[in-house]
Image (spheres, grey):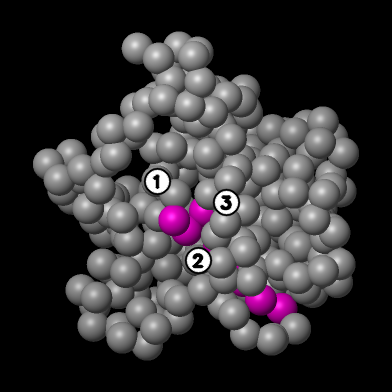
Amino acid sequence: MKCDKCENQAAYTRKYSGQKLCSQCFSNSIIRKTAKTISKYNMIKYDELVAVAVSGGKDSLALLKIINGMALTHNFRIKAITIDEGIPGYRDEALEIVEKFCRELNVEHKVYAYKDLFELTLDEALDLRENKKTSSCSICGTLRRRAIDFAAKDIGANVIATGHNLDDTLQTFVINMLSGDTTKIGWMDPDTSTNSLRKIKPFCEIYESEIVFYAFTNDIPFQSEPCPHMGEGIRTEIREFLNSLENQHSGIKN
């Protein structure tokens, strides 16, 4: 089976379109799609400093690699920031991966810890919650957003870039819809404002599965160990539901 773009052996088939691509053509398509999304929503402007939030997962590291390549030719600058929640046995591995990857890319990297910013780790914050039914993800998400905002301002960034992909966006939409939170649904549109600190998601139109393959075929090391609190919220069930729909109706996520 040959690549639809060249004569090389195909390595990936897009079920929703039937397109067959070799590893190189597939990687190029992800880079082009990312660049197209950035241009479509005017996400980054001339000479801006982009704070790339890098957790150590596949999405953020793939984004860092791609956006670093773009920065070299598209007249903007990047720095990587990582938030350390203080989760024992989980964050340490990610920090090692991110620090090494940033050195390889020659990207400046800075770590911001919950303990330094809020005087407590995530686990310590969870112990203080009055309503034990409040999920860990809800509390961590609030702290993480505040930490990322602080970090971006601290390094003088104009833009915050996160690795949220198409799947993440759809899951969040469904969660907000089920909870009746129309305000948050409105917030999901790409940030095209002229605010001094914008938030962008260059992978928002790319499947999670495609980012996984991009990371794999480009030898990007990433943390495979899931967060110990991952299964506490409804997101995992929503993910499984949407993946089931995609398997039955290819392209429905698009």
- Disc with the residue nearer the chain's start (1 vs 2): 2
Can you give x and y, in whole percent of width and height, for residue 237 in the image?
A: 22, 52
Q: Nearer the viewer, residue 132 or 200?
A: 200
Left or right: 126 in relation to 115: left
Q: Nearer the viewer, residue 90 or 26?
A: 26
Disc 3 to disc 2, how far (Cα)? 25 Å
Rendered residue at 28%/33% (across/down): 18
- Mark number, residue 207: 1
Q: Which residues are magenta?
A: 197-205
- Mark number, residue 34: 3
Q: Secondary structure at mark 2?
A: helix
Rendered residue at 50%/13% (across/down): 8
Q: Residues within 10 Å of mark 1 (few under 14, many from 20)?
A: some
User: What amino acid does circle 1 point to?
Assistant: Tyr
Left or right: 199 in relation to 245: right
Disc 1 to disc 2, how far (Cα)? 22 Å
Left or right: 29 in relation to 82: left
- Disc with the residue nearer the chain's start (3 vs 2): 3
Given this view, does label 3 or label 2 mark the residue nearer the observer?
A: 3
